[in-house]
Every structure is written in structure tokens, then in C-alpha cells.
Image (cartoon, grey):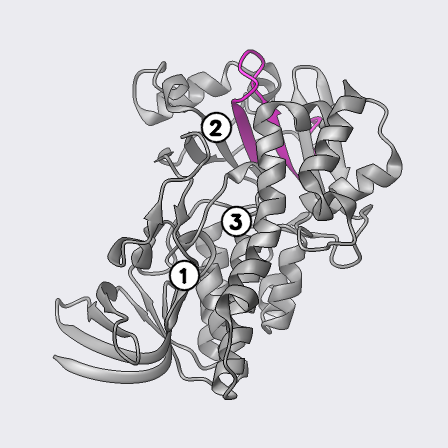
Amino acid sequence: MKEQDTDVVIIGAGPSGAVAAAFLRQQGRRVLVLEREQFPRFSIGESLLPQSMEYLEAAGMLRDVVEGGFQHKNGAAFAWGDRYADFDFRDKFTPGWATTYQVQRATFDKVLADAAARQGAEIRYRHTVTAVDVAGERPRVSVRDPDGGTYEVEARFLLDASGFGRVLPRLLDLELPSDFPVRGALFTQVADRIAPDAPFDRHKVLVTVHAQQPDVWYWTIPFANRCSVGVVARPEFLARYTGTEAERLRAIVAEDPRLSTLLKDAVWDTRVGELKGYAANVRSLWGRGYALLGNAGEFLDPIFSSGITIAFKSASLAAACIEREFAGETVDWEAGYAVPLKAGVDTFRAFVDAWYAGGFRKIVFQERQAPDIRRMIASILAGYAWDTTNPYVAQPKRRLAVLESLCS
């Protein structure tokens, strides 16, 4: 078995892994990225938030993304029966990026991975991590290559950016049950054929609430001439529908008049996927010589498209801690990584909880909204969940509860 050595091993070449690799290459670190699949490959989660642009810019990847030709995004829209509300991210409380993109992840992830490779990161596709040893002075990773051969890599640091693969949580027994109710999703992409004059803003993600089941919601994420379409619900709701995954999703979409009208000419030309029990949590986001990035650590819910923003934030924080370690400092990873990352995650969590409890839906569809409060909420929907000057970040649960009572 061959043995190799590097500064940092990253498991996974998705968004958090690619951005972390770029930050580490800026520090001059030797970076090896081990990716189980071959890019481009399908992945879910196509709607970015403006906050994520800050990290792409810092990682030296902004030009790559801009030149990727992705669909421009400036906000989020919500529909429930005949009610409609939207938030324009350009009118927000927190300074910073106000627009971003809707991205087809197969292309987007490869754009980021290729950019990281150009910056000097070594990416090995179809290399699968089979075991990890973190008991010694340095983490040691066992790997199987595409031909079935095996080798080991020793590194000073190990970052798990494997997303839903959750490699380290599985191998190191770090997994904990999420405190969110179990939910599932059916999803696909369609050639939407929505007419240009239809009441549909292609610059915004559309979240549609099911007419009879308010905790069930649909996403419609527009690209240039296609849409990502999905529904999120508890397993017992999804189990009511029989047939193939495609038949089940189309039957649920048909229950909403607005979506049915928008997609009446759509061509359903892509396989429908299903995710079950996607919410996840772990005992700790870090350990001796390793850290968990993005979805490998914790995944909340797709309702506010926070996943990639959290992934980028985790990559930025982890890279900063590693830079201090290489400089000879003693780094408190709990204080320098886990606590600041969780602060923003907990803000998103408060909004997700309020959405499913019904309070945030009342707020969204309230007809008379104070402009300053709208701007504060727009900031969080734009991903600025770490801006503690925003009262809805500093005290999200209390502020949302008060606002809900006022709307009632």
C-alpha cells in the first residue's frame, strides 16, 4: 500500500471543498481533494444567496462564476393560493452583495472545482475514502482508487466536505439525530416553457405553500430555459401518492393551480429524485486534526436555500483556523470555528422553525409590512445570518415571536 503526505486532505470536491481548497492554496498549503464521483455530476440545491458571493470573491473564484453564464437572482418570492409576496435582496438591511445566481449544480460545482485546481489544488476524482484514523499525531486516510488499488495519505489536517455523504460522521461515529421532524423531498428539472409574459419572475426563487397542507411546500428555481422543481413534506404525506417518483411529483404539483398553470407546457425530461430524512446533526463539528464543513456537519432544511452559504462560511472559518495553526498558534477550534459557524446556523434555524410552525408564513404574507423590518428580514433571506447588527440575527426567536403576534 502506497503512503503519501500532504498538508491538508479534503474529502469532497463540492462547493465547500473547492472553496476551502482555494483559501488554503492562497496560504501556500499543499492540498489534496478526494472526490468519490466524476464531475460533472448531478446535485441538488441550485439557489445561491448573495452572502455566498463574498466568499467566492475572497476565494478568487468570482470571475469563474460570473463567466459561467448562470441565471441572475435578486430575491425570493412566496405564493399561497391567491396570495403572493416577494423580497428584493437589493433592498436589505446589511451592506454587501445583493444579487447572486440560480445554478445548475452539475455545471456550478465543476466550475468551482476547476478553479481550485487552477489555483494548485490536486483533485482526484473517483477516489473513495474507506477509512480514517485520527488517533495519531496526524490524520491518516485510507483511499480506494478507480482501479481498485488502495493507498494511504497522511496530512496535518483533514476537512470533510462530503455533503450528504457525511464520511467522517459515519466513520468516526459522530452522527446525532436531528431535532427537526423527518421530512423528505421529490425533485427534478424540467424544460419549463413558461411564456415570457407569464406572472413569473425568473430572477427569484419561488416558494409555493400547499393549499390544504401548509407545512408542505414546493420550490421552483428558474434557470435560463429550465426550472428545478421540488416538493418538501413529511414522509406520511409523500406516501399517499402511488406510482413512480415522477408520477408522484407530478400529482402533487397538479394540486396547486398556480404551479399547474405555470408548468402546463413543461417537458418532464429528467429523472425524479427523492431524499428522505435529510436533516442531520453531529456530536461535534471538529476534533483533533479534523473539521466538518457544510452539510457534512449539519443540514437544516432547504426552505431558505441556506446550504451553500453555510458551506462557504464553514470553509472560510476552517481555513482561517488552519492558517493560525501553521503560524504556530494554539487554536481553540470550538471558539474559532464551531461557535461562530453555529451562530449563523442558529439564525437560519429560528427562521426554519418559524416557517414550519406557521409564524413566519404569517409574516411573509402580511399585507402591511414596515419597510425597515422588511429590509432586516430580506438580509437574512439573502444569507446575512451572521450580521449581529441586525436585530433579527441578534435575537431571532424573540423578534420573530413579537412580529408574529403583531401580524396576528
What residue do we see at 44% from left, 44% from top? Answer: 44
What residue do we see at 52% from left, 46% from top? Answer: 46
**Is 372 situated above or below 360?**
below
Amino acid carrying mark 3 in the image? Gly
Q: Is residue 338 visible to us here?
A: yes
Whether 210 is among the magenta residues is yes
The disc, 2 or 3, on the residue closer to the chain's N-terminal end is 2
Distance from Cα at disc 2 to Cα at disc 3 = 17 Å
Query: Does residue 88 appear left or right of residue 361 in this picture?
Result: right
Per the image, the residue denoted by label 1 is 161
Per the image, the residue denoted by label 2 is 231
Per the image, label 3 sits on a secondary structure element best described as helix
**Is 113 situated above or below 77?**
below
Amino acid carrying mark 1 in the image? Ala
Distance from Cα at disc 1 to Cα at disc 2 = 26 Å
Per the image, the residue denoted by label 3 is 307
The disc, 1 or 2, on the residue closer to the chain's N-terminal end is 1
The quadrant holding residue 316 is bottom right
Amino acid carrying mark 2 in the image? Val
Whether 225 is among the magenta residues is no
Q: Which residues are magenta?
A: 198-220
Pair 2/3: label in front: 3
